[in-house]
Each structure stands twice: as C-alpha cells, then as structure tokens.
Image: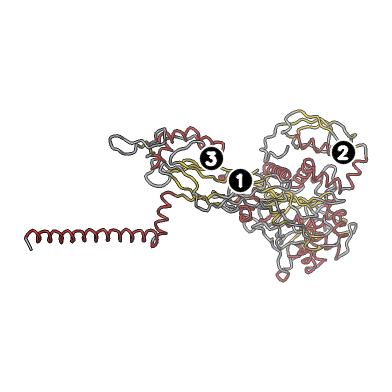
Amino acid sequence: MSDQQNIQSRDDNEFGKRLGIIVALFAVFIVGIIAMLLNIQVVNVKKYREKAARQYERVITEKAKRGVILDRHSRMLAESIESISFYADPAIVRNTPLFNEKGKSVIDKTTRKQKVYDNTIAVATMFARYLGGNKAVYLKELHRKTGMAVLGRKIPVAKALPLLQEKIAGVWFDKDQQRYYLNVAAQVIGSTDIHNEGSSGLELQLNRELKGIDGTIIYQKTATGKRYPAPDAKQQNPVKGNSVQLTIDADIQSIVEDELAKAVEKFRADASASIVMDVHTGEIIAMANNPTFDLNQRSSWSAEKSRNRAVTDSYEPGSTFKLIMASAATEVLHRKAEDRVNGQNGVMPIYNLFIKDHEPYGNISFREAIMYSSNIVAAKTALAVGSEKFYAYTMNYGFGRKTGIGLVGESPGRVRPLEHWDRTTLPWMGYGYQVMATPLQILQAYATIANDGVLMRPFIIKKVINTEGKTVWESAPKAVRKAVLPQTARYLGKEYFKAVVDSGTAKSAAVPGVTVAGKTGTARRAAGGSYSKPVYVSSFVGYFPVEAPRYAIVVVVENPKTAYYAAMVAAPVFSSIASRMIACSGEMQKKLAFRSTEQAAIDSVSTVVVPDLAGLQGRDAKRLLQWHNLEMDSSGDMDGCVGRQSIAPGQKVKKKTVIKVTLAPTTMKKTSSWLP
C-alpha cells in the first residue's frame, strides 16, 4: 500500500472518530434535553406549573355579596355595597414597555433593546387627582422594592369609576364588599370586621347564612401587565348570601332609641334598655339600649356600648316582680281586690330585720296595696302562699331560665333552687329581691298576663330568605305553657295593674286614648357588695289596650341621678314611647282599632280628649292628633318638638277641632331618618 493510501486511511479514521465524538455529544445533548423535558413535564410538572403560574397567572378571590338584614316591613337595616381596591406591581409600572401606534414595540437604536418608560409619576398624579391624598404617598408605594403596592382600599364605585376606565400597565383592582347600616338596633344587629365577616350580634350569629360563597377567577397577564380571564381555567362565580328578615319595626325602634337617649340625658343615668313585644305572637317589635354606638363607624364601638342589656343584664326587679305574688294570691289564697289587708303603718320587723314602705299604710284593700306598691303586704302575702307554691309560680312565668329568643349572650337570670332558700328568701322575693331577672324576662311575664295567661316564646328573627326569594326557614309563634288561668290573667290586669296606671304609682305611664295596665319598680341595687349606697334601677312594664291587649313594653333606667322613683323616671318614658308608636305606625293603628273595644266608643262620640303633645316631634304630634280625629296647625320646623299647644291636654273638644302648636328646634340628635 502506498504512502498516499496510508495517509488517506489515517484521515478517514480520525474523521470517523471525530464524527463519533460529535454524534455522541449530540446524543448526550439530546438525552439531556429529553431528561430535562421529562423532569419539567412529568417528574416535577407540578413545581414548574406553579412557578409558571406565579409568573403569568393570578388567582383572584371574588367575595360573595353578603346578604341583607331587613325589618318586618322589608326595609334595609344592613346591606353590602360594592367598593374598589387598587393595587399595582411596582416593577411593571417603573418599567413599562413602549409601543408604537401599530402596537409594535419601540426599539432603542443604540442599545437595540425595547424602550421602557418610568410611569410612576404619571400614575401617582392620576390617583392623587381622582382619589385625593398626597402624591408623595402614592410614589412611595410605587417605589417599593418588593411586594405589591396598595393604592387605595374600599373606594366607592362612583369615586373609583374614572380610574376603572383607564388602562394602566401594572395596575389592577379588586372588588370588595363594604357593610352599610341604617344604624338602629346596633346591639341586636351587630357588625362585621374588615374582612366582611360577622364579629358581633346577629351578624356573627347568622354569619353562615349571610356570608354566601366566595367565587374564584383566574387571570393571565401579558408582558405589559394587562390581565384577562384564563380561557382554559375553571371560573367559580360568587354566590350571594341569604337575606334575614327580623320582627323589628325600624320606625318604632328609632322612637324607642330616641326616648331612651332623652331619659339617659335628662336623669343623668348610667344606661337604659327597652323592649316592645306583640303579646299574642311573641314578636319583638323593638329592642333598644343606651349607650349605643354608630354601626358605620368602627371607632365608636366599645364592649360597654355593644352590650345588649335587654337580654344580657339581670337585676333585682323590685316591685315589677309583685306580679308573681298577685298571681299566687289570686289562685292559691283566692284573694279578691276588695279584701282588706294591713300595711302595719309602713314598718314590719322580721327576723331582726325590717321591711319598709315608702308611705305608712294601715288597713287598706289588696287592690290599694298593689296600686301603691306596699312591700309589707307583698311580703306577708308571699309568706301566706308558701315557698313551694311561690317557687312554682316563679318558674311558670319563665324566671330562672332563658326565654328562648335565641340571641347570643342571653342571661337566664337567677332563681335560687328551693332547697337553698333561707327564711328571708320568700318574704324578700314577694317584693322582688333575692331574685335576678332580665328586662326581657319581666316583659315576657307581663305579656303572659296580657295573653290570657299563656306564656309565649319571644323571637326576633322572622325568617331567612335565599337569593331566589324562597324561605329557607321561618320562626313561628310558640306557646310555651299556661302560667295562670285565663280568668286570673284578666282579673289581674283589670283589677290591679290597670288601677296602678289609673290611680296608683304609675299615673305618668298613661297614654291618651288607650287603656294601660302595668307596674312600676324602684329597686335598690347592690354596689360593691352592699346596699348601703343609693344606687337604683327604675323600671316600668305595661301593656295596652287592657280590654284586648296587643303590645307590651318594658323600660329600665339604670342608676338615674336626678330622680329615681319609677313614677318619675321610667313610667313617663313608657308613655312617650307608646304615644309615638301609635302615632307613627299604621300597622299598630289598624291592629288596635280592630282589637280595641274602646276605639269603637271613641268613634261613636262627638267629642274627644285632647292628648298631651309636649315633647313630641311635629310629625308625630300631627299623627297622634289625626288618630284622635283632631287637626293640627303648626308654626316652626316639623322636625322640632312641641313646646306649646293651644288647647290644654285633657280637655274635651269636638272632633276635627284644630289644635295650634308651636314647634321649637330640638337639640337632640335624631337616631334615624326613617320617620317620613
């Protein structure tokens, strides 16, 4: 073989080796690529999918709209309004790519890279112009090195609209829900937190029904930061929460709150509470407390102001508890109103202690003993009834256990088990001491008398309604037990508790044109474990009309300073609430006119008694006069209160007589604007 052939052979061998090496390298490269693809697409697919999603996908939780809370007439007490929150990716805002008119990227001729524009000053200026605030604050957010910039939270839609119409690279918005309240019944309705979750009251208690189901929207974004819904992702639309309807009447609730605020101010009291109930159904028409707070201003909230005293606070009721004594005396002792009893001239020694009356009563009728609220007669009567039977009547009226209204925090009060009674328990319980009761329990007991002796379960949640308008569940009136015989209940109301208002300690609770039965209670409260300091709870509970009862009201005023007898403090508040209720509520007027035999008598006569209008707002005074077939001629703002009236209260005049009134501006802040 020639030298030339040997050289050619060596070259071919070297070429083959080189080619083999190259092929091997390519093979290794291809295997590496395949291995990498397998790692990305098979082995660690979840990891890289999440990494990619973080780069170009964004999962947005769209909050469900919270259900509304309605009053008995379907008026809004609480609703959710949509608001907008703006966010930005500072890196995109600072490095916004530039595009020409045809949508093509603009390339820098020197660097041969895509041109960018720092958009932070323009964005900060725009947000400061539309949302207000300092431009420097927005710039500070947009110059963040890490994280997301917050440019505005919970902005009203109307205010945010100009910004929503702008297409700003790197800026997006989320829809939020913001709770708005009519601002009545604050302690009952409660409030929500910053996440729109219930935090107190019915908002917390019914959070599951009200909150709905949040939706999920998956967005993808382009290099410019523009977002669009991912076409292949499953989107979940939010489901609105159910609506809740209460038994509360917003107008009457507003009236009760207004009267409680006046009472607390006038008597410099620590607090007050009041409840209005339909005696036949147990529906709560109003439940109010003072002090209160602004539901739309979270800063006004405090634990003290948010407490629903009407159901959470128990106290020694004093003379309002004499209902138990009177019931047992009627059915056990067969005592009549005319029977004579001895008040022992106002002082009765017992077990080295003394029971005293505020007046020295001697030989009086049992009716007078209740009319003038004799503690001595009450104690003696309780002793005559006996412990076991007195205890049975106490339990029959619902004391010592929760009423079943279903509100969070309700107190059962306190009644000692019979085996723990000492020798002073029975006489002291006869006039309302050594027993603890809530305002709701006292009201429930008197509503039982008004309802022919049948104790009804009170309720405040009427029904829950879904988004299709169908009732999910509904409360219904429920009779719990028969506390006393129907004839006993009627006898107590007409012979004793009507007399208390007509001629006894509660004349100031009278309501013009309507018969009222009720009882005052002025109880000394233990302060610091002692009764030596004069701290009082003034209360009145009553119902009307006596002939065919429909509504019951309790008023409790804690620690009034300028006066403390219930006849001066709580009873007039009852009268004002009842008068204004009747004046403003068409529903109540119809029910009273249908039920009351007295209304027919009023309509049949040609003259009527002029009601007392003092302190009523102009619109309420006009309605009250119209209810009595009288007319009003006023001077002054109708939002003002009646200062003078041309015909004195109590005088009889012909129907359609014009009563001239002078309205003075009120210094009291209106609780609600519901009154038309």
Q: Would residue 293 be found to the left or right of residue 134 on screen? A: right
Looking at the picture, tell me which residue is in the foreground, 285 or 19.
19
Mark 1 touches mark 3? (CB < 8 Å): no
Label 2 SS: strand
Would residue 482 be found to the left or right of residue 561 on screen?
Answer: right
Instruction: Tell me the quadrant of the picture where the N terminus can be found.
Output: bottom left
Residue at 66%, 38% (x, y): give it: 669
Q: Is residue 82 left or right of residue 585?
A: left
Q: Which residue is mark 2?
A: 609
Q: Among all residues in the image, which is located at the extreme top?
A: 635
Residue 407, placed above or below residue 642: below
* Residue occupied by mark 3: 155
- Marks 3 and 2 sit apart, C-alpha to C-alpha, by 55 Å
Q: Position of residue 461 (x, y in %)?
A: 70, 54
Residue 37 lies in quadrant: bottom left
Which of label 3 and label 2 is nearer to you? 3
**Quarter of image, res 513:** top right
Q: Amino acid at mark 3?
A: Ile
Q: What mark, if any, has residue 463 been given in the picture? A: none
- Percent coordinates x, y for residue 125 in the rendering: 44, 33
Q: Earlier in the sequence, mark 3 or mark 2?
A: 3
Q: CA distance from mark 1 to mark 2?
A: 47 Å
Residue at the far left: name it.
3
Label 2 amino acid? Answer: Val
Question: Which mark is drawn over residue 80?
Answer: 1
Q: Secondary structure at mark 3?
A: strand
Vertical placement of residue 185 versus 120, above or below? below
Spatial separation of the CA atoms under disc 1 and disc 3 = 14 Å
Q: How is the image coloured?
A: secondary structure
Residue kind at label 1, given as amino acid type: Ser
Q: Residue furthest bottom?
A: 419
